[in-house]
Amino acid sequence: MGLPASQLERVRELLGYWQEQGRRWVGDPRRWRLVPVSADSAHLPLLASQQPRWVLWVEADAEGFRRAWRLLLAMSEIGGPSQLLLMHPPGLGRRGLLENLQQAAARYLGVELVVLA
């Protein structure tokens, strides 16, 4: 969620980066099946019940929080996933944007964002 299909390679690159950093849970980044899903997809509630792993991409720019928050609101309104891995470009610290988004999602939407920074 949050990243155009044309940029999915960025996610695979980040998975490769995490693997190189010793995060064994990543496994082989090439084996991950990455499927972009729109927050307004009519299939989101069904997919959320079937797929255990979801990712929300957050850009490091000034509008990153706003875009991610709008996606979370839209997903929440139509029964999207209640737990997502928060992915972002390398170098974005946990404090600030990521921490604020994580706390707001939990408090106001009941959505858990797993942050690896």
Image (cartoon, rainbow, N blue to C red):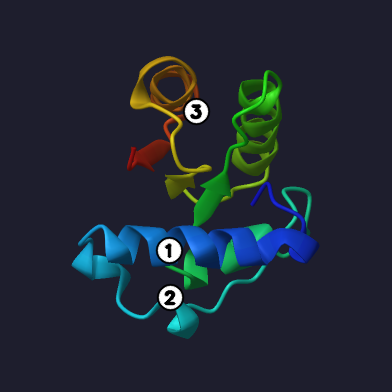
List the residue tagged with mark 3: 109
Which amino acid, by three-letter code, is at mark 3?
A: Leu
Q: Tell which of 80 and 98 is nearer to you.
A: 98
Q: Secondary structure at mark 2?
A: helix
In this rendering, the answer to whether 49 lies above or below 4 is below
Asked which secondary structure carries label 3, the reply is helix
Residue indicated by mark 1: 15
Marks 3 and 2, how far apart at CA: 30 Å
Left or right, residue 47 beside residue 52:
right
Amino acid type at circle 2 is Pro
In primary-sequence order, the first of circles 3 and 2 is 2
Closer to the eye: label 3 or 1: 1
Mark 2, residue position: 29
Q: Residues within 10 Å of mark 3 (few under 14, many from 20)?
A: some
The answer to whether residue 101 is above or below residue 53 is: above
Q: From the top left corner, tell me how far across and down residue 80 is, in percent.
A: 58, 50
Q: Is residue 35 above or below residue 66?
A: below
**Where's residue 4, x and y in %?**
77, 56
User: Tags 3 and 1 in contact by the CB under 8 Å rule?
Assistant: no
Residue 23 lies in what quarter of the image? bottom left
